[in-house]
Amino acid sequence: MSSSALTNYILAVCTITRDSVGGSGPIFYCKDEEELQKTSLYLEKILDAMAHEVRPGVMILVKH
Amino acid sequence: MSESTLIILVGTVLGIVCRVLLLKTDYRQYPTYPHGKIIHLALGVIASGLGSVLVATLLDKNYTAVTFLTLAASQFRDVRNMERQTLSNVDSMELVQRGPTYIEGIAMAFEGRNYLVTATAFLTGIATHFLHWYGGVLIGGLCILIATKYMSGRTVGDICVVRKGKVHFDGPNLFVDDILIYNTGLEDTKKKILKHGVGLILEPDNANGTVTFSNLGQRQAILHDVATILGVYRDSGEPSLVPLSKRDLDSGKLALFLLPLDQDADKAMAIVRRVPVLENAYRRPLKADVKPDRQL
């Protein structure tokens, strides 16, 4: 909690807007909002990470 | 019965009574029953024995017996270490952890209580020598009264006003009143939070409270106590459901976001008010004479 070491990691990114994300992490492209919600929910449970909405249509899964 | 025997007997008995009265297993379920209690009762017997035997030996002009006390001190420090280790090990398996500050506070209380027991036995022994056994019992009773009454510290309710706060979402962001708690994107989680979440706002009375609530250990202790008594709506593998506390940096208000199984906000408020203010977290900036009128 008080440690200055890096403790939060982005494990995956889910998006419905293909051109708004990029980079080296795992990216899950979804076709609509419903699929985005579902994919993020599954990933949240599987990875034990928390789904955060960065902007509409883009979710990141963060291990806290 | 010889006088020494009487001194040791009365002193030890009163010391043990003091330990028993200080050993309450409450909602914290600590010390655990029955084995945890036996450990502390046994140590209480040793502590009270030390106190009363000390009087008898000193009256016998065996002044080196004072070195006994150093033995007692190291013994009780071990008690503190033992408590710290046990609680820290157990804490890693809690859904809402106690936190190291709370654990240190508990460990410190256990060490401190043993000294109280020794002091009670010692004073009782002296009183028995000068005022016979009934005098000893009287002084011992007085010591016990002081120990039980004045060794309980302040509670959160003493340093702040607790009121209900509204749990709501603004987009993906969770708020309690106007204080941001965290961001969660899942509709499923939002529904659960709106259904089960309870928000409380703690408004410190003065700068002492504001600085005390900036301590993460104190805040974790509050969350832990609420979760212990009202249960918690979360499980492993549910990282989005987490009770949290966040501070409004401008006003010093503290927002608590709770996920109790029993969603009675009044009960939650009563519990928060009764959470002990941890010795290691409590600060009194108003005592500093740099700026006596200082408001935070």
Image (cartoon, rainbow, N blue to C red):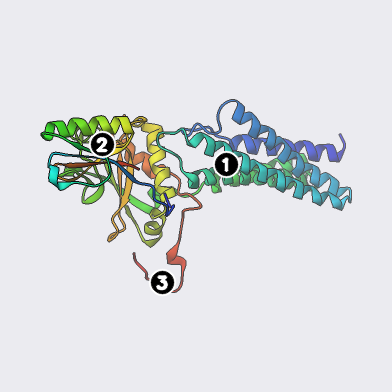
Q: Label 3 vs label 1: CA separation?
A: 37 Å
Mark positioned earlier in the residue sequence (3 or 2): 2
Place residue B114 in its image quadrant. top right
- Residue B263 in view of the camera: no
Report if the CB atoms under discs 3 and 2 are less than 8 Å apart.
no
Image-based side of B121 in relation to B276, left or right: right
Q: Mark 3 points at which residue?
A: B292
Q: Position of residue B40 (x, y in %)?
A: 64, 34
Is there one chain holding both mark 3 and mark 1? yes
| N-term-proximal mark, 2 vs 1 | 1
Left-right relation of B128 to A17: right
Q: How crowded is mark 3: few (under 14 residues within 10 Å), some or many (20 or more)?
A: few
Sequence-wise, the earlier of marks 3 and 1 is 1
Q: In which quarter of the image is the C terminus of chain B?
A: bottom left
Which residue lies under the disc numbered 1?
Answer: B84
Q: Which chain carries label 3?
A: B
Circle 2 sits on which residue?
A: B197
Disc count in the image?
3
Residue pictured at 58% horizontal, 46% vertical = B108
Which element type, helix, strand or loop, lies under badge 2? loop
Residue nearest the observer in this picture, A27 or B31? A27
Dot 2 crowding, Cα within 10 Å, few <14, some 14–19, many 20+: many
Q: State the residue in front, B145 or B242.
A: B242
